[in-house]
Structure formats: C-alpha cells, structure tokens
C-alpha cells in the first residue's frame, strides 16, 4: 500500500513530507511553513479574482450577491458561498422551497431525539446537511450577534431563557439562512419591518 505522510516539526515550524511504499519510507523533503502560507495566500487571491470576474460577467449574480449582503451576519467573504447555497436549494425545489425546508436541507432544523418510548432527550439540530455551509452560517452568526441589531436581540432573548450560548448561536445561524432565502426568493434587500415575523 502506498501512503503519503505529512509531519509537523513544532520546534522548527516545518512540514516533513514522506512517502511509504511496500513498508519502506522515502523522505521527500522539508518545507518551511512560511512558504506554505505564502502559497495558500496566493491561491486565495486567485480564487477571489476568479469570483469577481465571474460576477462581472454575470450581472444578475452580482446584483443578487449585493442584495444578499444586506442580511445581518452576511459579508463580502461569505455572501458568494451563501448565494451558491440558495441557488442550489432553489434548483432542488423549483424555487418553491420554504424556510423550514431550507433549514432542514442544510442540517439546522431542530430534531427531537427519541429512543423507544421512554427516553426523550433535548431537541438538537440534525447536522445532516452540508457541513461547509453549516460552519459558514455559524461563523456568520458569531459576527452578526456582535452588533446592536435584531439578531443580537434574538440571541440574548434565547440565552435569557436558559438556552446555552452555542445553541443560541445555532438558532441565529438558522435565522440567517432563512433571511438569505427570503431575500433571494423575493429579490428584495433585508428589511426589519418586512421580516419582523422572523426577527
């Protein structure tokens, strides 16, 4: 069996790369971490440029991305990925999906935990959706609850009722994807008065 091993030399801050074949190990080289960071930074710059060029070629996507950024917790770095998320859900549901369905699709819907007839545990999110989108929404929620806005008020209200901060952040993440779907499907920017029922 052929295997590639990557080891980290903490004392020297290097990456050691070795190749294993038929129980024999061949050392391939030592790579300083600063070179790897520089490489990754260049890759990020290339991706950012490609995303910008794609938006410039497709004006309707650029407008949708701009409108999506009006949602609380959504910024320049996260909006393109969330735009892909709502587009994907729109294709799957023929544009007729509901808020409950999109939270379930991305694994953020509360799910009762039951075992037999006697054991009933606290409800928790299903975590069956796209983990990258779930993580992204969680980070959006972390940023969104820092401001003086309805998302922070919602978070504090849940914590005040005894919910754990992590659970309250997940609920805020669920609210963000609901807002993104409503903004996308209605084609209108976020407005507290219009989205009062979901704030």
Image (cartoon, rainbow, N blue to C red):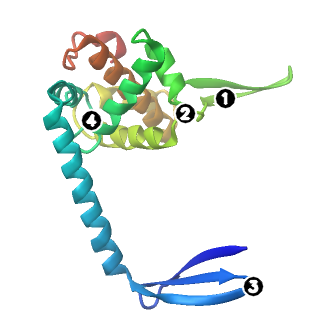
For disc 1, the neighbor class at 10 Å (few under 14, some 14 to 19, many from 20) is few
- For the point 59% across and 77% down, which residue is it? 5
Give the position of the C terminus as an image quadrant: top left
For disc 3, the neighbor class at 10 Å (few under 14, some 14 to 19, many from 20) is few
The picture quadrant where one finds residue 196 is top left
Rendered position, 60 above or below 45: above
Instruction: Tell which circle, 1 or 3, labels the residue nearer the N-terminal end.
Output: 3
Judge left or right: residue 137 versus residue 121.
left
Query: Camera-side residue: 64 or 8?
Result: 64
For disc 4, the neighbor class at 10 Å (few under 14, some 14 to 19, many from 20) is many
Q: Are marks 4 and 1 in contact (CB under 8 Å)?
A: no
Instruction: Tell which circle, 4 or 1, labels the residue nearer the N-terminal end.
Output: 4
Q: What whole-number distance in Å separates the C-alpha atoms at marks 1 and 2? A: 20 Å
Q: What whole-number distance in Å separates the C-alpha atoms at marks 1 and 3? A: 49 Å
The residue at which mark 1 appears reads as 122
Judge left or right: residue 58 versus residue 115.
left
Q: Are marks 4 and 2 in contact (CB under 8 Å)?
A: no
- For the point 46% across and 90% down, which residue is it? 11
Q: Are marks 1 and 2 in contact (CB under 8 Å)?
A: no
Instruction: Tell which circle, 2 or 3, labels the residue nearer the N-terminal end.
Output: 3
Percent coordinates x, y for residue 56 in the rendering: 13, 36
Instruction: Tell which circle, 4 or 2, labels the residue nearer the N-terminal end.
Output: 4
The residue at which mark 2 appears reads as 129
- Give SS at disc 3: loop
The picture quadrant where one finds residue 117 is top right
Q: What whole-number distance in Å separates the C-alpha atoms at marks 4 and 2? A: 19 Å
The label nearer to you, 1 versus 3, is: 3
Q: What whole-number distance in Å separates the C-alpha atoms at marks 4 and 3? A: 50 Å
The residue at which mark 3 appears reads as 23
Instruction: Residue 74: give its label.
Output: 4
Q: What whole-number distance in Å separates the C-alpha atoms at marks 4 and 1? A: 29 Å
């Amino acid at each position: 069996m052929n295997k590639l091993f990557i080891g980290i030399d903490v004392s020297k801050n290097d990456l050691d790369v070795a190749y294993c074949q038929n129980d024999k190990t061949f050392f391939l080289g030592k790579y300083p971490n600063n070179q790897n960071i520089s490489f990754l930074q260049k890759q990020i710059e290339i991706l950012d440029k490609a995303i910008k060029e794609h938006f410039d070629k497709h004006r309707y996507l650029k407008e949708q991305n701009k409108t999506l950024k009006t949602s609380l917790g959504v910024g320049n770095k996260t909006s393109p990925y969330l735009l892909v998320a709502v587009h994907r859900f729109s294709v799957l549901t023929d544009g007729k999906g509901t808020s409950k369905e999109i939270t379930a699709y991305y694994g953020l819907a509360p799910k009762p935990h039951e075992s037999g007839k006697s054991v009933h545990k606290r409800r928790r999110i299903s975590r069956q959706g796209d983990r990258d989108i779930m993580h992204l929404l969680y980070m959006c929620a972390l940023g969104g609850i820092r401001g003086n806005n309805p998302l922070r008020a919602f978070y504090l209200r849940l914590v005040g009722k005894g919910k754990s901060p992590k659970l309250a952040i997940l609920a805020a993440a669920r609210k963000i994807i609901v807002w993104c779907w409503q903004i996308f499907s209605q084609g209108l920017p976020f407005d507290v008065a219009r989205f009062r029922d979901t704030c």
